[in-house]
Image (cartoon, rainbow, N blue to C red):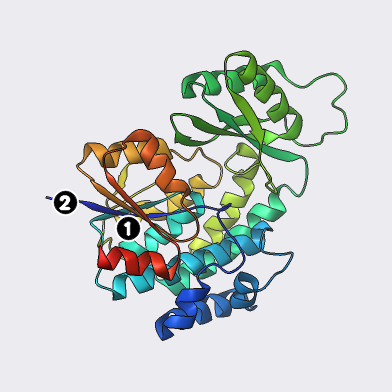
Amino acid sequence: MSKRVFMFPGQGSQYVGMAKDFYDEYPEVREVFAKASEAAGFSVEKLCFEENDQLNITEYTQICMLAAEAAVYTAVVNAGINCDVTAGLSLGEYGALIASGAMTMEDAFKVVRKRGMFMQQAVPNGGAMAAILNLDPAVVAEVCAEVQVAGPAEDAGEFTLPYVVSVANYNSPVQIVITGREDAVAKASAVCVERGARRAVPLKVSGPFHSALLKGAGEQLGEVLADVTVNDIKVPYLANVNADYVTSADQVKPLLIEQVSSSVRWQQTVERLLADGADEFIEIGPGATLTGFVKKLNKDVKTVNIDKLADLKAYLEA
């Protein structure tokens, strides 16, 4: 029996014009953007559809990305396509929450707007992230621990953040993202290359996301979540923190708070889904990053990314 997964991408896949064709085609999608704009206090449509300098700034990126994902999701569901299980990477976990029924769109937009602001403000400068390519995940984690224990160089006096470096994302067998203070990330990157990594690629991000440096942002998020109602879970979803199914509404808020400063276990999430019989993965929203990660783990399962209206129509006609 076929088991379909809806996947929602994280920050970094955004682009100007995302979901615009869905917006032009469907009144219900325009309603989604209206809800996002109301929660944000500014025109999300304008940031998503018109050239601007804010779309790649975290406090704006997150609400815009979630709006685009929710828009495409709405069109997909209205076309009669449903899922058996869902998951999302980092920010994308909020898309999964919507798909699971655990959180309304209105509440998800309100929470994500604040989440982006808190994450942006937590570490305004001095943080970094890098993708480590083709090195065993255990070795990457080991290197981060060693570098952090060794401490900073003697000439690192200009840095005021704690000396932190850790794994941010277990994306696929060939891509692990590390995060932390800029000099610590640079050191860990160099050591990873020494130990066999093909490359270490600095990422264009505005903070050391999913590191201990963001713990305060998670605590602030908890205060926002305190006023949010979590509904019964209708569609199973897996959490980033532990790559496990969330089975009760009581688990949702603590996991979302922890997620801000914890490693995203995406590879483990996909492996769990594959082990449980998932054989069709549909990525909903901008880009095809998650589709690529799934293919790295299993080339035989069906993968689809629905980013454009043409993608949805092609899927329906297949």
Label 1 amino acid?
A: Ala
Question: In front: 253, or 26?
Answer: 26
162 sits to left or right of 230: right
Label 2 amino acid?
A: Ser
Residue 227 visible within the image: no
Residue under label 2, please give it.
Answer: 2
Q: Which mark is residue 249?
A: 1
Residue farthest to the top? 195
Q: Residue at x 62, y 66 (%)?
A: 16
Question: x, y percentage for residue 113?
Answer: 58, 66
Q: Which mark is residue 47?
A: none
Question: In front: 116, or 16?
Answer: 16
Residue farthest to the bottom? 27
Q: Is residue 152 above or below residue 51?
A: above
Where is residue 209, by image quadrant? top right
Question: In what quadrant of the picture does the C terminus appear?
Answer: bottom left
Q: Residue at x 58, y 29 (%)?
A: 132
Residue 313 visible within the image: yes
Q: Residue at x 49, y 46 (%)?
A: 259
